[in-house]
Image: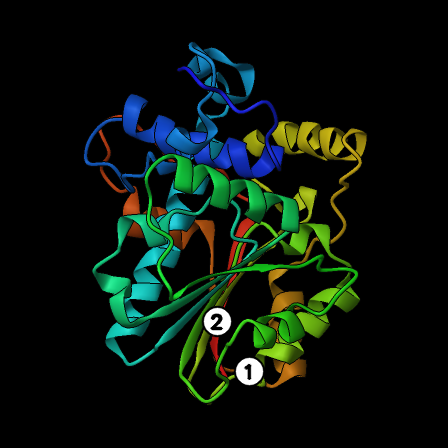
Amino acid sequence: MKDQPRELPDNTAARTALWRALHVQEDAVPHILVDEVGLRLVAPEDGWQERPDMKYTKRLRASIVGRSRFVEDLAKEQFEQGAKQYVLLGAGLDSFAQRNTALLSDIDLYEIDQAETLTWKKKRLIENGYEISANFHFVPVNFEESSWWDTLLDKGFDIHKKTFVSCTGVTLYLSKEAIMDTLQKMTLLMPQSSIAIAFYLPLEQLEEEDQGMQEMAIKGAEAAGTPFVSFFSVEEVKQLAEEIGLNDVRIISTGDIRNAYFKGRSDGLTPASGEIFLVAKV
């Protein structure tokens, strides 16, 4: 593909966007999620599908499309039940806004991520002809150094409106203290608002065939200067939710995602183990 940007803001964001596109290109129908917006933004060189991080990571690709579909289904359910704001913590190159323009016509969407990621993303969206509507808000934050909540409020977020908050790909990089602070801030949302937050299991609790890939990922993250910090067992996540005082707590496992979206596939596509979701109400 031509006109490749010289730099990407975040390798993880770009990689997961390409995994979502590769699912459409390589995996059998029906597709779990149809999302090639990130591919247009990243504009990789021809042959990107043969890169090792694409070619040999089928289970990780399945995890990404599975979690994306799960979160999107939750979001749509919450909109039907009256939620008027959608906050994406760790938005990366998520493209919900670009693929659901009619649905979001009366929803305020707030994408929270590192400033350089959001600046790059906004530039590429405009270059690719996507409209940045008045109710689509970019919220630049360094999670460990500044308050995402204060910045969100500065961007016009209304605590008196029912809200859905999703958080994927974030807790792995945060200290437990920062995670607790994030959860505590969510209790300030309007009652009956909902949250869905991804946590990551310790290495020894992964299925055996996923442990080698995770060990490589841990080493790679360390070498890149973005080490994985926090892993939680299911019981530890439940304890966090109890300490914070969340309601209607559910833990969604890899098995739940498989049963919901991957049963009976002709290509045997199935997500890797390791990621769980805390789903709860305020």
Tell me how far mark 1 sits from mark 2, CA to CA.
10 Å
Q: Is residue 201 left or right of residue 30?
A: right
> Could you tell me which residue is drawn at 48 percent across and 46 percent down?
122
Which amino acid, by three-letter code, is at mark 1?
A: Leu
Q: Element at badge 1?
A: loop
Quarter the N terminus occupies? top left
Front position in the image: 210 or 177? 177
Name the residue carrying label 1.
246
Front position in the image: 24 or 95? 95
Q: How crowded is mark 2: few (under 14 residues within 10 Å), some or many (20 or more)?
A: many
Position of 2 relative to 209 (above/below): above
Q: Where is residue 68 in the image (x, y as percent from the top left)?
A: 40, 49
Which amino acid, by three-letter code, is at mark 2?
A: Ile
Q: Element at badge 2?
A: strand
> Where, by quadrant of the figure, is residue 63 drawn?
top left
> Could you tell me which residue is drawn at 37 percent across and 26 percent down?
22
